[in-house]
Image (cartoon, coloured by chain):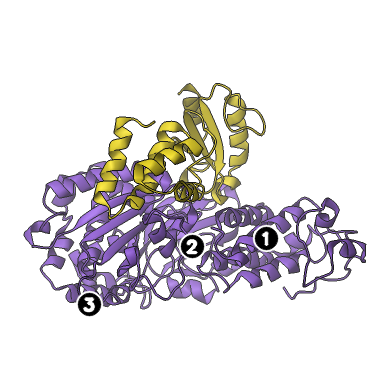
Chain colours: A purple, B yellow
Amino acid sequence: MADFLTRHTKDPAQKKLDTARGRGAYEGFRRALAMSRQEVVAEIDASGLRGRGGAGFPTGRKWSFIHAKEGQSVYLLCNADESEPGTFKDHHLMTFDPHLVLEGVAVGAYAIGAHRAYIYLRGEYASIAETLAAALREATAAGIIGQSCLGSGYDLSVGLQLGAGAYICGEETGLIQSLEGKRAYPRVRPPFPAVHGFLREPTVVNNVETLACAARIMAEGAEAFARLGTRQSAGTKLISVSGAVERPGVYEVEMGYPLMQFLSHEAGGISGGRRLKAIIPGGTSVPVLTAEEAAPLTIDYESMLSAGTMLGSGGMIVFGDGTSMPHALLRIAEFYAHESCGECTPCREGTGWMAWVLRRLLAGEGSPGDLGLLLRVGDNIEGRTICGLGDASVQPVRSFIRKFRQEFEALAPLPVAFPAWQLHGHGPRTGRFGPPVEEAAQSQPVEGPPDYVL
Amino acid sequence: MLTSEGLEEIEATRAEEPSARHALLTALRVTQRERHKVGPEEIEYIAGLLGLSPAIVEGVARFYDQITASPTGQHIVRVCGGITCYLSQSDRVAQDLKGFLGIADGEETSPDGEFTVRLVECIGDCDHAPAGMLDDRFVGPLDERALRTISER
């Protein structure tokens, strides 16, 4: 196990400023303040740090996109919405080391020239917001954050905002909208937040873990971080593992750590003496891996990519043998259907459809072409929406069906006289692109294999 | 309609932010906490308080899951229905809990208005599956002991 970020998270006293400072808290910020903004950005760039929220975009480069014109204000937003199913690493980090998170926010804000920063937490994290608020009061009283931080002449104020229950607020432009007191409908890009973000001003949105890494990099130097991990995945990663393991929890590992070793050592092995069936490595928005696929992988961006999936948020969900993959997929599909914000038609309608078709398959009311239909609906969502939620909703559907095809095929007893939706008189209404509903109900059922290549 | 404490919280946010609109989410949260709902009456009130159109307030209120049009109980128990918790049979836990608290099938709130039990999407506490919250507190795993603690509240 690595401890670049979590060295002190086991000690409850770490929440107190005195204890944390005794262990070097805010020394990274102090070092940053002694440098120019550009030097801080260069240092983060040299460290190889990539965004830890899911996308893995190089943090230094993201910061370098900020070019404020005369009279513009710059904002740093810390994304603590953490709503990706299976992800609870930021929960852990903010609870046990709030000062590290605040220091990261301060470093990031300084690097981009922001004098106002916000930490946006999901509504369920109200108790964590209190922990952060207490830490912020201490840091402000000690002159670390506020007017002339650490006596440097640099001013910074930090606001905390709680959401009220919406997954989409974790999408960076959704977060900005919510922070502005609006429905969290994501914005069309370009313009990107670096140009038109919060209040239409240049804005950077960074994940909690990313900023915590930045704080530690400033304290220890880029080299200390770059030395860890692999060439394309520097540093360490917080992995929140849950599901069929003996010791679910948050673990910090060096990038490049073998996945199977992680499962057997850190996570304590598969629970109940069962065997590994599948793993979702980075939150439900990334493709699932079968046990065979997962076996040779290591925990880093490139290894996951080579297997056709992503490291994502590091929210690892483990499935033991005996798990019904169709049931699991239905639950995941229902999540996206519930959380689609409704802004874009393909996602709003498509996510509902995918859940609906899965539900009827599991109810024994499926029709022959349903698996093909699921994949087609997915194809019609992907790439046709403003934000990534639509694309994300397709990944589990596509990967579960392809990789556990037999389980899904077993659900569709053939032939079915009429699709359930026609019998029940609700569901799809064919219009321009198909026969009228009454006509379709009279036509012969489709026989033979699904007309879609799985 | 709101306590002076609640009003102060909204006022403090409003004073810190560039416009009244930025205090809307906080106002909705405070109102939900104190009134256990944000219905038409509350919407009118918040609109008056922040100088916004009631349509804007309602539009935002109805977007967020934790802001409810109909009243919840004094305490709200959120049972996590996220994938990990679902695999630990959290839907059954929610059923058991409802039975325990005398909440009828198809209802969310106990007859005495004390508790609301809701099966919600992932709450980000998956290592305590089946996870749950009693108001703002994480109380998972929802084993027998946790259920007793909740019912004794």
Q: Nearer the viewer, mark 1 or mark 3?
A: 1
Identify the disc placed on residue B152: none
Per the image, label 3 sits on a secondary structure element best described as: helix
Q: Residue at x 47, y 28 (%)?
A: B74
Chain of the residue on which disc 2 is drawn: A
The spot of residue B89 in percent (x, y) is: 61, 42
Q: Amino acid at mark 1?
A: Met
Q: How many C-alpha atoms fall within 10 Å of the one at disc 3: few (<14), some, or many (≥20)?
A: some
Give the labeled residue for mark 2. A282
Q: Is residue A240 above or below residue A217?
A: above
Q: Residue at x 54, y 65 (%)?
A: A286
Name which of mark 1 and mark 3 comes first in the sequence: 3
Per the image, label 2 sits on a secondary structure element best described as: loop
Chain of the residue on which disc 3 is drawn: A
Give the labeled residue for mark 1. A354
The spot of residue B115 in percent (x, y) is: 52, 28
Inter-mark Cα distance, 1 to 3: 45 Å
Q: How many C-alpha atoms fall within 10 Å of the one at disc 1: few (<14), some, or many (≥20)?
A: many
Give the labeled residue for mark 3. A42
Q: Nearer the viewer, mark 2 or mark 3?
A: 3
Q: Residue at x 43, y 52 (%)?
A: A88
Q: Are marks 2 and 3 in contact (CB under 8 Å)?
A: no
Identify the image quadrant of residue A400. bottom right
Per the image, label 1 sits on a secondary structure element best described as: helix
Q: Nearer the viewer, mark 1 or mark 2?
A: 1
Residue A74 appears left or right of A384? left
Q: Amino acid at mark 2?
A: Gly
Viewer-side residue, B153 vs A187: A187
> If the image is split into quadrants, where does the N terminus of chain A sit?
bottom left
Viewer-side residue, A209 vs B104: B104
Inter-mark Cα distance, 1 to 2: 21 Å
